[in-house]
Image: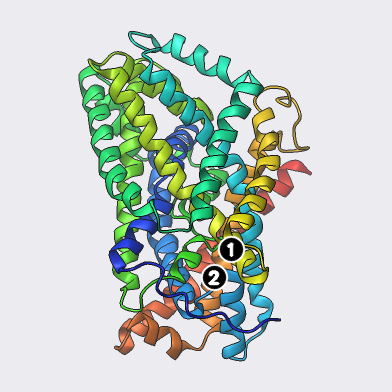
Amino acid sequence: MSEQVTGRSDMWSNSFIFVLAAAGSAVGLGNIWKFPYIAGENGGGAFVLVYLICIAIIGIPVMVSEIMLGKLGRASPIQALLNLTRTHNRSTRWSIVGYMGVLTGFLILSFYAVVAGWVCYYILRLFTGEFTGADASTVGEAFGGFLADPMQVLMWFSIFMVVTIFFVARGVTRGLELCVRFSMPAVFVLLLILIGYGVHAGGFVESVAFLFTPDFSKLTPQAILIALGHAFFTLSLGMGAIMAYGAYVPQSVSVGTTTFTIAILDTVLALLAGIAIFAIVFAYGLAPDAGPGLLFETVPVAFGNLPGGALFGGLFFLLVALAALTSAISISEPAIAYMTERSKLSRAQVALIIGGVCWILGVGSVLSFNVWADVKLAFFEWTFFDSLDKITQLVLLPLGGLLIALIVGHVLPKQVVYQELGLLQERAQNAWSIVVGFITPIAVFLVFIIEVIREVFTHL
Ligand code: PFF
């Protein structure tokens, strides 16, 4: 194996830029597209409560762990784990988490970019005023018609992929800061406008009740695993993306404060998106469990019926596309960082190779909504798109998160961890050790195992 990699700590010129970049990674389609539709499919309130608990007791400790590992290892996740385990005389096998992360990144980016392609098409559709005055059924049919056309979907997916590769090739910081600094507050404002529309159209109260009144009879074991997996997905955890960004963090960054800021921002944006979308769902009598099309079947209805809606609607989808871009860049980072370390290729060449592989995989997801709609994975009835989505969210990310918690809680010497986190008092040290060493891994393990056993039994 090669020598240790060091000297990359100057990438984020200050801690604020790191917070922006990490927030840019966390806030994306997971918040605006995915959270509302999975909350809708899983019955609302009780699911949302479990999701919030997962963010608090699993997401936050794992994020602290990832940033810390990146900061300590100062390299790609694979190399960082190799560096750390060697330095502290531990088994280098733990670097498997890094390899898993690279694989997970390929799988996620391939389908993430397909959905981001849908968003790009919707920028155009809204700006051109296609939905002005449209009712819900017209908007729903327009989405169905779009998905049924593989060439059209392929084209928009490819456009998004090319833009992502372009930014990845140019390096992580350029453009990212600007993008996040302006687009994040703007998304926030547009979501508030949408919520205002919901209040006006009459779905707001029902929406809030749907999302925040837990009905535990609707909570299935699978829903708990989905909530857990989504906590990882939405915070970009379990595959080394935040760890890869952590490798460039200035020493002065407070890991705890950064983590809380990102987790709160990410959660608030998801909840706002949920409130906005369900307000439209209930105002128009639509189905909350419409699935992955929910965003595209609701938001255009609202903008179509608002004064200036074509402009604001186009802007909304543009901002969602930018949020998706800053996330997509981070999804590729573990693989990019590793390949640039290990080969003589330039960052641009590596970006092209990784982008190319993701593009090929992504074609499967493009076809899942039309030509291959009936090609399903045995037992689960998942399309190609569903399979990638579920395998990453329900298996690979939780497993990655579990292993990361174990590395920080049990593999690295405790003093190294305490020192890096600035935990001086014994009480704080013990509390941290209990959370990351026991509560987080046991919670992930239990949810995971119970659901796997249940699935095995139901399919026997
Ligand atoms: N957190 C991103 C979102 O919510 O859209 C998606 C994501 C980014 C997942 C980075 C995983 C990752 F490593």
Q: Residues within 10 Å of mark 2 (few under 14, many from 20)?
A: many
Q: Quadrant of the N terminus?
A: bottom right
Asked if residue 36 lies left or right of residue 77, the reply is left
Amino acid on which disc 1 is placed: Gly
Check mark 2 vs ligand 1: CB closer than 8 Å? yes or no: no
Residue for point 32% across, 83% down = 422
The residue singled out by tag 2 in the image is 404
Q: Quadrant of residue 32?
A: top left
Q: Is residue 214 above or below residue 5?
A: above
- Residue 390, compared with residue 333, is above or below; it is above
- 23 versus 439 height, above or below: above
Q: Nearer the viewer, residue 143 or 217?
A: 143
Where residue 253 appears, as percent x and y from the top left, is: 32, 73
Please state the horizontal and vertical placement of residue 295, each as a whole percent of the image: 43, 28
Residue at the (70%, 41%) spot, across then down = 360
Q: Which residue is mark 1?
A: 400
